Image (cartoon, helix red, strand yellow):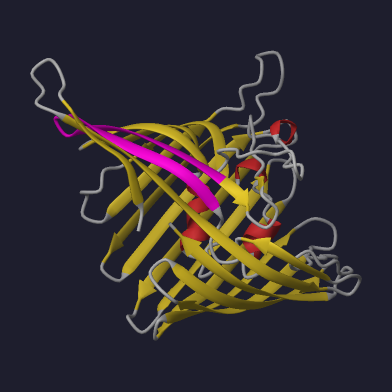
Amino acid sequence: MKKSLIALAVLASAGVASAQSSVTLFGIVDATLAYGKGSVANKTQLTNSGYNSSRIGFRGTEDLGGGMNASFWLEAGMNNDNGTGAATSLNNQASGTSTASAGTQGLTFNRRSTVSLGGGWGELRLGRDYTPQFWNLTVFDPFGTNGVGTSQVLNSSLGGPVTVRASNSIGYFLPGNLGGFYGQLQHYRGENASNVANDGTGSAIRLGYANGPINVALAYSSTKYSTGDIKTTNIGGQWDFAVAKLMGYYDRDQISGGATGKGGLIGALVPVGPGEIRLAYSTYKNDLAGTPKTNKWALGYVHNLSKRTAVYATYAQARNSGGAAQGLNGAITAANTNSSGYDFGVRHSF
């Protein structure tokens, strides 16, 4: 249960009767015993985020009256296995990506740092946020892009620094009263000087429909880079059969004048008592020399001890070809050889 830290009722001026403000502390602590096996080297580690990404955050909303509201969201990723924070990007480019040096990196609000205005017309959101092209990769992945079972599309993506999040973004979200239709439009800036390449600047859009058992969405993005603009298109969907949720997506990344990557996922979530079985098959390849390709199978189980606490186990195997050398959970494997790994962990949310 989320804990409200502050609940205030303040009288506003100019004839507005009152406005309410609230600030909430929230977070997840997820510890994972992870093992990876490869043809060159194996690795065992106590890490984090095998089920849900570990984080701590603050969010708040103020009622402005007349159906309007203002809100903020500050969310920091954290490595609870060693106490460090997580890296972020200043400009959606490799040159602006900070490193999370062990023992020196404090909390960074890398996951989300936004301020918003909302109403019946939708929401205007400013700051660092998830990109539209990422949502289909995580919403329609049974493993939620976490742990050893994470989709191979995300592991091998050619989508560049904005595959997951973008800094310096301006976003608009459709209101939630459109009969199941939803959407997000986002523009993000690399913020380079006018006399250098406009790297890291781009725009993206996502449109979807969710009603009853069905949820489908299409996303497209285009980001400028001097090494070749990156364009990503993906489409995903889910159907809830009550006894199981089937889901999947297709993704295509193209670098102008360069490589093209294609991949997809098909998977399922099957409720079993107080828990859930997770199953996924994902694949990704590009047209570089040899046509590197990796296929991955993943099987997992989550057992809910309460609404806030769960234990989980996941096993995955990656098969490489065409020169690919994807190792799981930090293992090192030679080109065209297999790798496997497992996660055992506990997740607590607050």
Task: State whether the magenta stretch is mostly helix, strand or loop.
Answer: strand
On the question of residue 147 being in view, the answer is no
Quadrant in the picture for the N terminus = bottom left
Quadrant in the picture for the C terminus = bottom left
Picture quadrant where residue 67 is located: top left
Total numbered labels: 0
Residue at 73%, 69% in the rendered image: 294
The percent coordinates of residue 219 (x first, y second) are: 47, 50
328 horizontally vs 303: left or right: right
36 horizontally vs 154: left or right: right
| Residue closer to the observer: 259 or 241 | 241
The percent coordinates of residue 202 (x first, y second) are: 56, 33
76 horizontally vs 306: left or right: right
Is 67 covered by the magenta stretch? yes
| Picture layout, residue 248 above or below residue 155 | below
Residue at 63%, 34% in the rendered image: 92
Bounds of the magenta segment = 55-76
On the question of residue 73 being in view, the answer is yes
| Residue closer to the observer: 333 or 85 | 85
The percent coordinates of residue 122 (x first, y second) are: 27, 38
47 horizontally vs 311: left or right: right
Is 50 covered by the magenta stretch? no
The percent coordinates of residue 155 (x first, y second) are: 68, 59
| Picture layout, residue 203 above or below residue 269 | above
| Residue closer to the observer: 103 or 236 | 103
Residue farthest along the front direction in this orientation: 5
Residue at 77%, 72% in the rendered image: 36
